Amino acid sequence: MSKDLNQCNFIGRLGRDPESRFMPSGGAVANFSIACGDDYRDKQTGQKVEQVNWISIVAFGRLAEVVGEYLRKGSKVYVSGKQVTRKWQDKATGADRYTTEIVANDLQMLDSRGAASGAGAEPTQGQAPAPAQAPAGQPAGQSGGFDNFDDDIPF
C-alpha cells in the first residue's frame, strides 16, 4: 500500500498565547490556534464577505519549546504539518469525542516582533531560521521599497 500525502500549510495569527506543558517523559508539548482569513463576494448583494477559519495546532519537542518561548497572541506564523484526528472519551459523559488538529513539523515566525525575538535562537529541526534582518537605515519588515501591510490585516 502506498503512502498518501498528508501535508498542510497555513499562514495566520495566533488567537491567544500558546499553552505549553511537559509530558511525564519530559518532552515539551505546545497547543495553539491560528486564524486564517479568506474573503469572497456574496452573489446576491455583491458585498465582500470575510470568513475566518481557526486552525488548531500542536507542536512537540524542541519546536514546542520555541513556540512557548517566542510566540504570543497576535504573532504571525507559517506552519506546516500533517492533519490528524484523535479520538478521546469525555470524562463527564463517557461519550467518544474527536479532535482534528495539525501536528506541526515546521514553523516560521513572520512578523518583525517574532523575527527579532527569534533571531538569537539557534535553528532546530522543524524550525525554519528567522528571516534576515533589514539593512541598516531601513525599518524592519520593509524591503525593496514595499510598505508593510501587516497592520491592515483584520485577523
Image (cartoon, grey):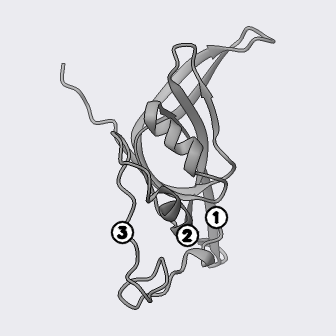
Name the residue at the right extreme: 92
Amino acid type at circle 1 is Phe
- What mark, if any, has residue 40 been given in the picture? 2
Amino acid type at circle 3 is Ala
What kind of element bears circle 3? loop
- What mark, if any, has residue 132 been given in the picture? 3
Instruction: Report the front residue among 10 and 18.
Output: 18
Q: Quadrant of the N terminus?
A: top left
> Mark 3 or 2 closer to N-term?
2
Q: Quadrant of the C terminus?
A: bottom right
Whole-number angstrom distance, CA of label 3 to CA of label 2: 34 Å
- What mark, if any, has residue 155 been given in the picture? 1
Residue in the picture at 64% in, 70% down: 49
Location of residue 45 in the rendering, given as x and y in whole percent from the top left corner: 67, 77
Number of residue marks = 3
Image-quadrant location for residue 88 = top right
Residue in the picture at 51% in, 36% down: 64
Whole-number angstrom distance, CA of label 1 to CA of label 2: 15 Å
Amino acid type at circle 2 is Tyr
